[in-house]
Image (tube, rainbow, N blue to C red):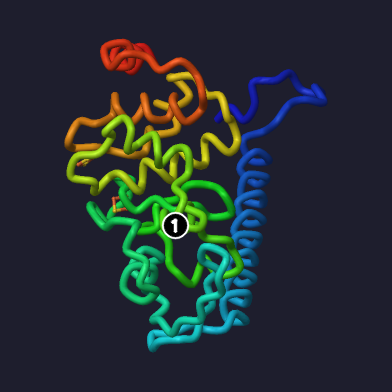
Amino acid sequence: MKQSTSPPGDPLSVSRRSFLKNLGTTAAAGAVSAAEGIAQESARAGAEAVQGPDAVPITLRVNGETRPLTLEPRVTLLDALRDHAGLTGAKEVCDRGTCGACTVLLDGEPVYACMMLAIQAQGREITTVEGLARNGNLTALQEAFVDKDASMCGYCTPGFVMSLTALLRRNPHPTPADIHHACAGNLCRCGTQPRIVQAALQASGVEVLSRTEVISYAHLA
Ligand code: FES
Ligand code: FES
């Protein structure tokens, strides 16, 4: 049986026997390192304190206030806000990360509150739609939603307001394309998106496009 196609004495020649031998050694080394990784992971998991299943004390920072709560670790941030902290601004619509009605800000970034556990939000600054107005004065964006009549049933509205608030804080003069992009994770089943874009443009002080222009921009974006 032919063992190697390389000429004898060639330093690069590899016999089938040595190839298989080295392959076995490499596979064995890989298996050992995988086993070590699993063992380290198990040790780490064992060292972490187990939370629950019963309710545990947690502390959330919401709209600048400290909120001590006692919750089962399985409770989502959305349910903690709505059912335990009395903040019903963030809406539960799909409860599976597809509609954006539950959007809140976590350290200034929009997140779906239905898709994270309340216990995970500890130590972060949470802002809900209730935390935007100051002394009863709506923000420019909220005012623009009213001016542009950018709400019908209103279920999606808080989520849009939160996503656009985050956008306007980091980019005070967005283009219509920026606005569409910022709202990519929010759905309005009533069809108010063109008015929402107009409201965001008004709040940023740029020229407000007609609804037809806004719609055509949406197709280009
Ligand atoms: S309720 Fe959270 S994304 Fe729809
Ligand atoms: S206003 Fe009804 S879903 Fe947007």
- Quadrant where the C terminus is found in the figure: top left
What percent of the width, then of the height, locates residue 125? 58, 61
Helix, strand or loop for disc 1: loop
Query: At 26% across and 12% down in the image, what residue appears?
Result: 212
Specify the quadrant of the image occupied by residue 37: bottom right
Residue placed at 23% from the left, 52% from the top? 94
In the rendered structure, the answer to whether residue 109 lies left or right of residue 142 reads right
Quarter of image, res 197:
top left
On screen, 47 above or below 158?
A: below
Q: Which of the two residues, 187 or 86, is positioned nearer the viewer here? A: 86
The answer to whether residue 149 is left or right of residue 69 is: left
Q: Quadrant of the N terminus?
A: top right
Depth order, front residue of 147/7:
147
How far across and how far down the image is residue 95, in percent? 27, 56
In the displayed image of the protein, which residue is found farthest to the front? 136
Look at the picture and state if 137 lies above or below 117.
above
Left or right side of 31 for 138: left
Is 136 rendered above or below residue 217?
below
Task: Tell me if mark 1 has few (under 14), some (14-19) or many (20+) residues whose alpha carbon lies within 10 angstroms of its own.
Answer: many
On whether ligand 1 comes within 8 Å of the CB at mark 1, the answer is no
Residue type (three-letter) at the residue carrying disc 1: Thr
Q: How many marks are shown on the rendered structure?
A: 1
Q: Residue at x 51, y 24 (%)?
A: 205
Q: Position of residue 99 (x, y in %)?
A: 28, 44
Residue annotated with mark 1: 128
Q: Give how far across and how far down residue 149 sits, in percent.
A: 26, 33
What residue lies at 32% left-to-right and 11% top-to-bottom? 213
